[in-house]
Image: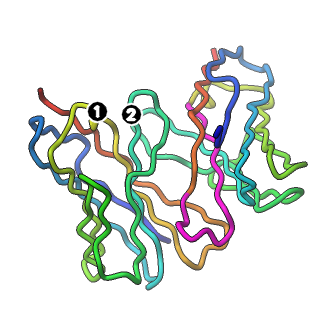
Amino acid sequence: NAGVTQTPKFRILKIGQSMTLQCTQDMNHNYMYWYRQDPGMGLKLIYYSVGAGITDKGEVPNGYNVSRSTTEDFPLRLELAAPSQTSVYFCASSYFLSSGNTIYFGEGSWLTVV
Amino acid sequence: AQTVTQSQPEMSVQEAETVTLSCTYDTSESDYYLFWYKQPPSRQMILVIRQEAYKQQNATENRFSVNFQKAAKSFSLKISDSQLGDAAMYFCAYRSAMDSNYQLIWGAGTKLIIKP
């Protein structure tokens, strides 16, 4: 019963490097999301997807890219990492028209850009 | 635009006692959903309780209950018989029923400290 799985859990990047945060869910959810959480703050939406092949920008998309080739996977790409991208990243998913309207979160990925 | 405000950056309570965390929100919509999420030191976000705005009855999940005051746009979380494992950040979140993209709007969080 894996739910939403994110990898890696911790990563240190140098300024200008690129990396991909992986996210996969096994609940057959239509909707997937990437959030970032800065210290002492709530979550901010980076990108979201309503189904395979469909993605859209959230509140803070600059510096990131996503793709959704399958229902299960929703990777987040960081290009040219900057210190401002130091944060905790959460992947999440939900059903369309879920009776509970509940969003399920992964365990988070700690990213430090130095 | 909708906003969610948690006015208590930090709260503390004695173990076994009751504590209430405040949340207010601003919206012009009549149909929406409200959530409380718990984030322990492990940083995983865990759903605590949810409330549908069209339901007058306050949601309850074991020791957790809400006081939903729609007219006042208030959504407080009451934790009864506080336990050490309840220590965490608690986030209030709002989602419009009109938003087919299921986007959540988050408060800044309240840190709950449990005193043994």
The picture places residue B62, in percent across and down from the top left corner, at 28, 54
Relative to B107, say whether B12 is above or below.
above
Q: Which residue is mark 1?
A: B85
Indicate the quadrant where residue A49 lies: bottom right
Work out whether disc 2 and disc 1 sit on a shared chain.
yes
What's the chain of the residue with tag 1?
B
Q: Is residue A1 left or right of residue B96?
A: right
- Residue occupying image coordinates x 56% and y 71%: A99
Relative to A28, say whether A113 is above or below.
above
The picture places residue B2, in percent across and down from the top left corner, at 46, 70
2 or 1: tag closer to the N-terminus: 2
State which region is magenta: A88-102
What's the chain of the residue with tag 2?
B
Q: Which residue is mark 2?
A: B40
Amino acid type for the residue under numbered disc 2: Pro
Q: Name the quarter where the C terminus of chain B is drawn.
A: top left
